[in-house]
Amino acid sequence: MKVNDVMIPFGDFPIVNKKTILKEALTEMGQAGLGLVCIINDKRELIGLITDGDLRRKLLEVQKPFSSFFIDDALIHAKKNPITCKPDDELKKIVNLMGEKQIWDLPVIDKNKKLFGLLHLHPAVKKLI
């Protein structure tokens, strides 16, 4: 079984462009009910990823007024080189990696380095069981 068999397709999870402010990125994240938002460039390449956990840690680390975060570019607070997988990766191998790294969601990148989908842990585990 491959990642492609279970992943959420492009467009069905939170995605914003590199010029999006954090407030808009958080709105996208909240509407989707997932704890992340992917940031892409004009070529649809993944250039950053914000998770709710990363954001929580950042808020505690950076000492500035909470409201001032909202107008920052989302990319400022994103992981620039997140762990990713490919559509043809073995699902079991990737689920094991997600468990080791304690990752709930993993961006799926195609051979052209474009964002292709998102692997969410729960459906992946369910498919393997």
Image: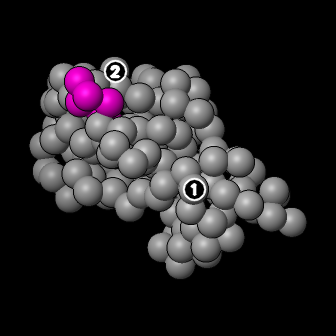
Q: Secondary structure at mark 1?
A: loop
Horizontal side, residue 88 vs residue 22: left or right: right
Amino acid type of the residue that numbered disc 1 sits on in the rendered structure: Asp
Give the image location of residue 87, x and y in percent. 55, 51
Please say if 69 is above or below 127: above
Instruction: Tell me the residue at 57%/56% (across/down).
Output: 88
Please say if 77 is above or below 125: above
Q: How many marks?
A: 2
Amino acid type of the residue that numbered disc 2 sits on in the rendered structure: Glu
**Who is closer to the viewer here, 66 or 84?**
84
The answer to which image quadrant residue 19 occupies is top left
Give the image location of residue 49, x and y in percent. 34, 45
Question: What are the residue bounds of the magenta stretch?
Answer: 39-44
According to the picture, the residue beneath numbered tag 1 turns out to be 88
Q: Nearer the viewer, mark 1 or mark 2?
A: 1
**Who is closer to the viewer here, 38 or 59?**
38
Whether residue 70 is visible here, answered yes or no, is no
Q: Dot 2: within a 10 Å radius of its alpha carbon, few (fewer than 14), some, or many (20 or more) residues?
A: some
Whether residue 91 is visible here, answered yes or no, is yes
According to the picture, the residue beneath numbered tag 2 turns out to be 24
The answer to which image quadrant residue 43 occupies is top left
Tag 1 and tag 2, C-beta contact below 8 Å: no
Please say if 68 is above or below 102: above
Residue 73 part of the magenta-drawn span: no
Q: Earlier in the sequence, mark 1 or mark 2?
A: 2
